[in-house]
Amino acid sequence: MLLHIMINLPQPAKIVLNELESHGYEAYLVGGFVRDFLLGRETHDIDCATNALPHEIEAIFSSYKQSHIGKDHGTIGVKINGDWIEITTYRLDQETKDHRRPQSVIFTPSLKEDVVRRDFTINALAIGSSGEMIDFVNGQKDLESKIIRCVGDPELRFYEDALRILRGIRFACQLGFSIEKDTLEAMRKQSFLINALAVERIYQEFKLMLEAPNPFPNIYQSRDILSVFIPEILECKYLDVVNHCDTWLKKMSLFFIDKDEETIRVRCNHLKMPKKVIKDCVDFYMCFKHVYNDQEIDIKRMMQAYPSSILLEAMELKKMIDLEHYQEMSHDMLKRLIQENVVVSIKDLKINGHDLMVLNFKGKAIQEKLNDCLEAVMLNKVENTKEALIQWVNLT
C-alpha cells in the first residue's frame, strides 16, 4: 500500500535520503523511527534501508565519519550533524544463531522482501523523502488500532529471534497497545526460548517494561511468559498497584515484598543487575519491612543506614499496599527531617578531626569522639555548631 503524508523530517534524515537518491538508489526511513514519528513520539534512532550495497554506502558517504560494526549484516553507521544514522542494505536473514542473530544475510534489491522479515507490523513501515509511506503488512492500520502484531508467522518470528517476545511486550507497555491474539499465543508457546537470551538483555527489556507509564494490563496478561525469568511474578499479590508506582524501584520491589532478602539477592544476581541496582532493591526491602515506632531517633537511624530517597519510596509503597502497618506520623516525620537536612553523618558535623586534635585528642579517640558528637546531635542533646560541639566535648 502506498500512501502520501505530510512530513517534516530531521535534517540528518533528509541528507541521507537525498544523497542515496541522487546517486540513483532507493532509500527509505524504516523501523522504530517511522513508528514513533507517526505516533508523534520523540525519537532519536534513525534507521534507513536502501538497495545500495555496503561498499556503495561507504563510497557515497566517504566524507562523513562512519562506523562499520554492523557491516557484516549490511549496516553502515554514518554521523551527520552530530547524529548517527544506520543505513542498511535491503536483506534477507538466514538461519539464526541461538534464536537471536542471523548467522548470515543475503542482500536483496527488494524493499518488500526486506520489510516482511521484520518483527512487528508497526515496525515494518517505510517513509520516502517526498512523504510516500509504503505499507506491505497493514502496519498503519495496526498503529491506528493500537495493536502489536507479528509480521507473518508469529511462531517463526520468535523462533528466529527470541528477544522479539520481550520487545513485543515492552512495546505494548510503552505504547499502551494490546497484543494481537495469535501473537500473544505464539509468545506463550515460544517463551522457553527466552532462556537462550543473554540475561543482561532480559533485564534491560524488563526494566523498560516497568518504566512505562501504565504497564499493568500487559504485565498482567504476560505474567506467565515473564515468569520464565522472574517466577515471583506469578505469586505477586500487588500487580494491580504497578500503574500507581511512580518509580522503577517501587514497581520492581512489588515482586519481592512478600519474599526474603536472600530471594531478592538471588533473583537480582541471576538477572545480572548492576551492583548499585541490587543494593537499592535490598535497601528498599529492608526499609519497607522495618517496623517504625514514630520516634524521631528511629527515623534518623534509618536515614543513617539507608538513602533517604529509598526510605521515602518504601514508606510511600507501604501506604499503598500495607495500610495496616503504615505509620503516618513516621512518614510525615521523615519528610520533615529530609526537608530540614537533618544531621545523620559525621561529615555533616560542624566539628572535625582537626578540631579535636587541637583539643588534644589522638588516634582512635578522635573517631570515637566524633561518633559521640554525632550521637549527641542526633539525640538533640547538643546543637550542631562548632562552638556548641567544642563546649560539649570539653564538658564530657
Image: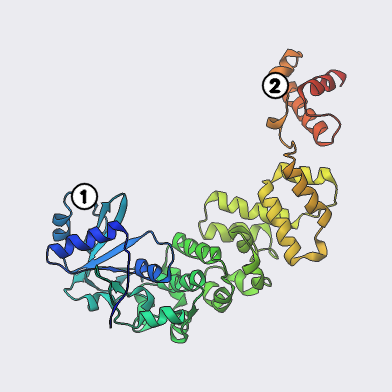
The residue sitting at 76% across, 43% down in the picture is: 337
Residue 39's spot in the image, x, y percent?
A: 42, 71
Left or right, 10 with reference to 379: left
Residue 318's spot in the image, x, y percent?
A: 74, 61
Looking at the rendered structure, the kind of residue marked 2 is Gly
- The C terminus is located in which quarter? top right
The residue sitting at 67% across, 54% down in the picture is: 284
Say what secondary structure mark 1 lies in: loop
Q: Is residue 75 shown to the viewer in this render?
A: no
**Which residue has dot 1 on it?**
64
Disc 1 residue crowd, few under 14, some 14–19, many 20+, Cα 10 Å: some
Disc 2 residue crowd, few under 14, some 14–19, many 20+, Cα 10 Å: some
The residue sitting at 17% across, 62% down in the picture is: 20
Residue found at the far bottom of this picture: 182
Residues under labels 1 and 2: Cα distance?
57 Å
Residue 16's spot in the image, x, y percent?
A: 23, 60
**Which residue has dot 2 on it?**
353
The residue sitting at 71% across, 35% down in the picture is: 345
Say what secondary structure mark 2 lies in: helix
Left or right, 301 with reference to 130: right
Q: Is residue 318 shown to the viewer in this render?
A: yes
